[in-house]
């Protein structure tokens, strides 16, 4: 469905701003899309769940959503019993969130590295991208403009004719 497994990460750890760690069953981490896939077993999410655990799970989901994550909860029994139905559902969700199910090549390796750098720093410059990728000014600007067209990056400073600094768009800010 995605063309590659490179963007899927099992047992993905995120740290909330308050220091609380959350683990996702499987995370889809792409420059323009963050999805937490949770496979919920009946016993751990129903029979063994008390009110405190129930509330903690809802707080966790809300914190992740506020940080830009989309959450898909799937009953573990359905994964075993209805895998094709869930495959279609996930494909539909990805289509809804991205406008289409994108092939693996939608973001180049260089663009992925630029996004990774932008996630580490508040603001990145053309020079940062030149150093990161070992390319010239023109190629660095091409990558940055491509990511801006894809609504992953936005100019960090407004009002200038030529943009020198970029940051993640508000929708790309993650935990």
Image (cartoon, rainbow, N blue to C red):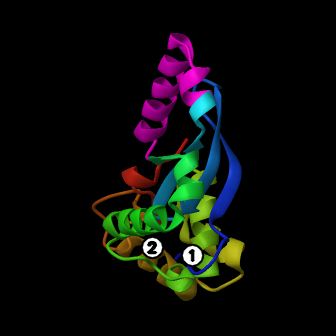
Whether the magenta-drawn stretch holds residue 58 is answered as yes
Q: Is residue 123 above or below residue 22?
A: below
Which residue sits furthest front? Answer: 81
Q: Is residue 146 left or right of residue 83?
A: left
Q: Looking at the picture, does residue 100 appear above or below residue 63?
A: below
Give the extent of the magenta segment. 44-68
Determine the CA span between mark 1 and mark 2. Answer: 7 Å
Q: Which is nearer the N-term, disc 1 or disc 2?
A: 1
How many numbered marks does the figure carry?
2
**The residue tagged with tag 1: helix, strand or loop?**
helix
The residue shown at (64%, 76%) is 130
Residue 111, numbered circle: 1
Q: Position of residue 95 (x, y in %)?
A: 36, 70
Q: Are marks 1 and 2 in contact (CB under 8 Å)?
A: yes
Q: Closest to the observer: 166 or 31?
A: 31
Can you identify the residue that label 2 sits on?
147
* Whether residue 43 is situated above or below residue 84 in the rendered picture: above
| Residue at the spot 55% in from the left edge and 85% down from the top edge | 105
* Main SS, magenta residues: helix
In the drawing, does residue 92 fall left or right of residue 67? Answer: left
Helix, strand, or loop for circle 2? helix
């Amino acid at each position: 469905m995605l063309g590659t497994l490179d963007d899927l990460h099992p047992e993905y750890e995120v740290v909330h701003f308050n220091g609380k760690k959350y683990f996702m069953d499987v995370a889809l981490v792409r420059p323009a899309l963050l999805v937490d896939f949770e496979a919920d077993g009946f016993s751990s999410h129903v029979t063994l769940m008390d009110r405190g655990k129930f509330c903690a799970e809802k707080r966790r989901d809300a914190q992740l959503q506020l940080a830009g994550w989309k959450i898909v909860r799937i009953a573990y029994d359905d994964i075993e019993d209805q895998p094709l139905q869930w495959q279609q559902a996930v494909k539909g969700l990805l289509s809804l969130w991205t406008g289409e199910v994108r092939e693996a090549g939608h973001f180049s390796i260089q663009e992925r590295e630029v996004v990774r750098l932008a996630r580490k720093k508040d603001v990145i410059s053309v020079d940062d991208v030149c150093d990161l990728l070992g390319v010239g000014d023109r190629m660095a600007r091409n990558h940055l403009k491509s990511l801006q067209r894809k609504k992953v990056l936005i100019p960090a400073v407004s009002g200038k004719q030529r943009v020198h600094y970029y940051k993640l768009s508000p929708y790309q800010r993650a935990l």
